[in-house]
Image (cartoon, rainbow, N blue to C red):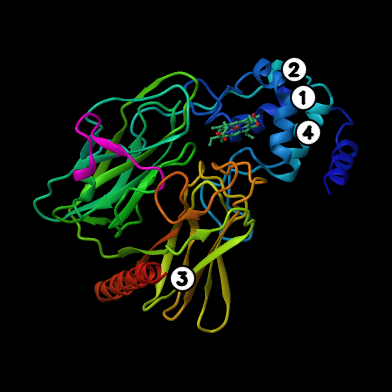
């Protein structure tokens, strides 16, 4: 396929090799420089000819094997916004350019670098939650998952129509997730020195909700008109920040903007939490499988999805079996990487009627052949939140039709979770 395409491109084209200015820069500027520019998360810049030429072979390789741009969901399993993928033709161009010795071409043809908007993207927030103290991420070592707790001390319900996380330091801020905690657990865990606590695999409480966070290159957006998150009295906002050490100590003080509306939401947004707590993986097991299923008591319009495993997770699949027999594929990540766990937003909401069975399957590889295995030699792995434990989780965010539906779904999901927990205890 690639060979054919390469041949086709050279014969149909002028026969000349692609150049940086005309062919390669537009690809890099549209797909790479959000992360590979000064002050961003990428380990080097790809903003000039000199920077790209030095790495032309590596660029061709990561494009061909699809490690870059980082994008985990597989085609055919959900259509998402802000996808980061290259077309077959773009990959072929990068490859042909590298093979031709990375020619520059006419610098006058190089397009302008995109301008990255600084400041709040959505506008001035009504409430700004700022990390009380700057956090210093160490130069070396494993990635860090900090949970910063913002006690909101809300007197009565408030409605949030948008959330924007504005990282203080894009060099170390790999991604962020917003969590809601109405159990009071997070504030007890927070260390007054940092205003937060470390939690590798999870926040240490069952979130009462999720909010948009931050992913490099993704556009912060307000919810659809009529949609809002209701923050109830006693709810705290918890920001999970993923820091990726850069070789230099980096200081971050991230802010979260909450945009409020007076209007009570007319749409009812809620999520379904699925998981497995029965995990018990023998050392050497290359294909440990655990599953969960949940029957929707009401119709759900699915808008987003987030999946979770730890380091030896290798494959996660989520699909829905509709009452009339049709199967809808919701997400598949066949090459799980703990460091890239985004929340994926569907281009169009996926409507699942009442009675739909949502199924999830998590697979793990607890062998030496798995380069991400933290144990060498492999050890028995149980469920837990530590970096050498494992988890299987999925959060499906959506909208239901009425307030009554919301309660039905909430109760069913809580009941489901109690069942998942009791299965673990029975083991
Ligand atoms: C969303 C952010 C992001 C985007 C977009 C992105 N990169 Fe990267 N890139 C990274 C990060 C972070 C790393 C460091 C490795 C890691 O953490 O996965 C990296 C590493 C690399 C590496 C080194 C890989 C290695 O094996 O040493 C290359 C080459 C690279 N990127 C090229 C590209 C190219 C080419 C594009 C666009 C087609 C691109 N990247 C888009 C974030 C990004």
Residue 306 in view, yes or no: no
Report if the beta carbon of the residue with label 2 is closer than 8 angstroms to ligand 1.
no
| Crowd band around label 4 with a 10 angstrom C-alpha radius: few (<14), some (14–19), many (20+) | many
Task: Tell me if residue 194 is in the magenta stretch.
Answer: yes
**252 to the left or right of 342:** left
Task: Return the disc, 2 or 1, that comes first in the chain's sequence.
Answer: 1
Q: Name the residue under label 1.
A: 19
Mark 2 vs 1: CB contact within 8 A = yes
Q: Mark 4 points at which residue?
A: 95
The image quadrant where one finds the C terminus is: bottom left
**151 to the left or right of 104:** left
Corner quadrant of residue 227 = bottom left
The Cα atoms of the two marked residues, 4 and 3, are separated by 40 Å
The Cα atoms of the two marked residues, 1 and 4, are separated by 11 Å
**Disc marking residue 106:** 2
The Cα atoms of the two marked residues, 2 and 4, are separated by 19 Å
Image spot of residue 17 (x, y percent): 84, 27
The magenta-colored residue range is 188-201
Mark 4 vs 3: CB contact within 8 A = no
In front: mark 2 or mark 3?
Answer: 3
The Cα atoms of the two marked residues, 2 and 1, are separated by 8 Å
């Amino acid at each position: 396929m690639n060979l054919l395409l390469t041949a086709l491109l050279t014969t149909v084209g002028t026969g000349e090799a692609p150049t940086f200015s005309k062919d390669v820069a537009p690809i890099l500027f549209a797909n790479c420089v959000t992360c590979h520019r000064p002050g961003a998360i990428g380990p080097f810049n790809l903003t000039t000819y000199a920077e790209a030429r030095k790495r032309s072979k590596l660029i061709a390789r990561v494009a061909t094997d699809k490690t870059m741009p980082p994008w985990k969901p597989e085609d055919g399993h959900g259509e998402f916004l802000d996808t980061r993928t290259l077309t077959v033709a773009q990959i072929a161009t990068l490859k042909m350019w590298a093979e031709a010795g990375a020619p520059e071409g006419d610098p006058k043809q190089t397009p302008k670098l995109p301008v990255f908007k600084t400041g709040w993207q959505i506008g001035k927030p009504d409430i700004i939650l700022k990390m009380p103290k700057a956090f210093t991420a160490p130069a070396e070592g494993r990635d860090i998952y900090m949970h910063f707790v913002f006690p909101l001390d809300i007197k009565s319900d408030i409605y949030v129509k948008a959330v924007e996380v504005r990282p203080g330091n894009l060099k170390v801020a790999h991604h962020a997730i917003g969590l809601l905690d109405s159990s009071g657990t997070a504030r007890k865990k927070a260390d007054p020195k940092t205003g937060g606590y470390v939690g590798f695999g999870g926040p240490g409480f069952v979130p009462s909700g999720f909010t948009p966070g931050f992913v490099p290159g993704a556009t912060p957006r307000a919810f659809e008109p009529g949609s809002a998150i209701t923050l109830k009295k006693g709810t705290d906002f918890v920001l999970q920040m993923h820091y990726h050490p850069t070789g230099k100590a980096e200081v971050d003080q991230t802010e979260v903007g909450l945009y409020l509306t007076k209007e009570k939401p007319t749409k009812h947004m809620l999520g379904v939490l699925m998981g497995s707590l029965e995990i018990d993986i023998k050392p050497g097991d290359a294909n440990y499988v655990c599953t969960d299923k949940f029957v929707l008591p009401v119709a759900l319009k699915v808008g987003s999805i987030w999946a979770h495993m730890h380091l030896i997770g290798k494959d996660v699949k989520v699909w829905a079996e509709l009452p009339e027999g049709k199967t809808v594929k919701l997400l598949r990540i066949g090459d799980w990487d703990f460091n890239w766990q985004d929340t994926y937003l569907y281009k169009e909401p996926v409507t699942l009627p009442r009675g739909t069975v949502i199924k999830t399957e998590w697979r793990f590889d607890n062998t030496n052949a798995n380069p991400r295995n933290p144990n060498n030699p492999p050890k028995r792995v149980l469920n837990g939140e530590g970096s050498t434990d494992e988890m299987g989780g999925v959060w499906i965010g959506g909208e239901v039709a009425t307030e009554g539906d919301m309660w039905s779904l909430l109760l069913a999901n809580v009941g489901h979770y109690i069942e998942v927990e009791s299965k673990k205890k029975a083991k």
